[in-house]
Image: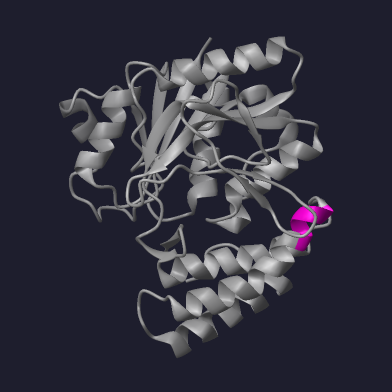
Amino acid sequence: MIISAIVVTYYPNKLLLSRLLHSICGEASIVYVIDNTPKESVDWLCSEWFVKSDFEVKYCSLGDNFGIAKAQNVGINFAINDECDHVILFDQDSSPPIGMINRLYEAEIKLLNSGIKVGSVGPLFIDEKTNQYSPAIRKSWLMTKRVNISHDENLPVSSDNLIASGSLIRLSVLKEVGLMREDLFIDWVDIEWGLRAGNFGYFHFIIPDAVMLHSIGDEYTSIGKRRINLHSDIRNYYIVRNACHLLLDSSLNRQWRISIFFKIPKFVIFYSIKTLSKKRGKVLFLLLRACSDGFTGRLGKAF
């Protein structure tokens, strides 16, 4: 069984990237590092650095930022050409424990042997900033349902989609369902793929005893007992734009589209008020432009 890891980088932190590679290089058969950092913007990030650091990786610089979906697809195509069986996706700031990849693979085998059509399996996340576990997400009639998970649960927990980082996917599934949508650029990429795989009859599972640290967002704010991650204004643009575009996608489950419909005004209002830049008027204009771009299909890299 050949499992390849795909790490997407964009102006990476050297210590965090080293932490990730130390965890996965001895466990994945092949590690691809696909770099979205504009060419020569980070002087240490090159093939020689990986060699000097004793990381056995295949490094590919795209020369510019083409979005996370494009970078993931480049890595997936490398894995197909190298005749791998699985890919596992990682963001540059994730921190999987040693043994996590094998644990996910074992869980997938058990699910497949029980007759379940598995699309992907992934770890239970702990956000490093909020120290909270990420829930499973499932469709309900009007809004998506958040299912809280405890790390001491023994059984896999189904979710309509998984966070991309840490998700283990068989290449046979990707060949049937298709690769990531590059026109989304960033945000909603993993959700769209998970829901698309669901249309093919595949199910996704969080494995509670495979726990991974992950950093989501730049800051966070608290509303009641819930802590909500905050992103940069441009990330919020992509979140809103892609939500508007996917609302029109008739291939998505109707309940998910209804949920998206209710989320969009909440996104616009919340991100305008809780902007990290504090320029609320400009941010509101940006998010209204995001709605227009999403509804009219102006996708890809925005700026």
Nearer to me, 97 or 79? 97
Say if 156 sits above or below 159 in the image: above
Name the residue: 15% across, 28% down.
52
Residue 156 lies in quadrant: top right
Q: Residue visible at 46% across and 30% down? A: 151
Q: Which residues are magenta?
A: 254-258
Nearest the camera: 248 or 108?
108
Left/right of residue 74 with respect to residue 229 in the rendered view: right
In this rendering, the answer to whether 26 lies above or below 95 is above
Residue lying at the far front in this picture: please name it: 224
Vertical comparison of 14 with 81: above or below: below
Q: Nearer the viewer, residue 198 or 229?
A: 229
Asked if residue 106 lies left or right of residue 176, the reply is: left
Choose between 97 and 11: the one closer to the eye. 97
Magenta stretch, overall SS: helix
Q: Position of residue 124 (x, y in %)?
A: 48, 34
Please provide percent x and percent y for residue 239: 56, 64
The image position of residue 285, as x and y in percent, is 53, 86
Q: Is residue 157 visible?
A: yes
Residue 67 belongs to the span the image colors magenta: no
Q: Residue at x 39, y 50 (%)?
A: 36
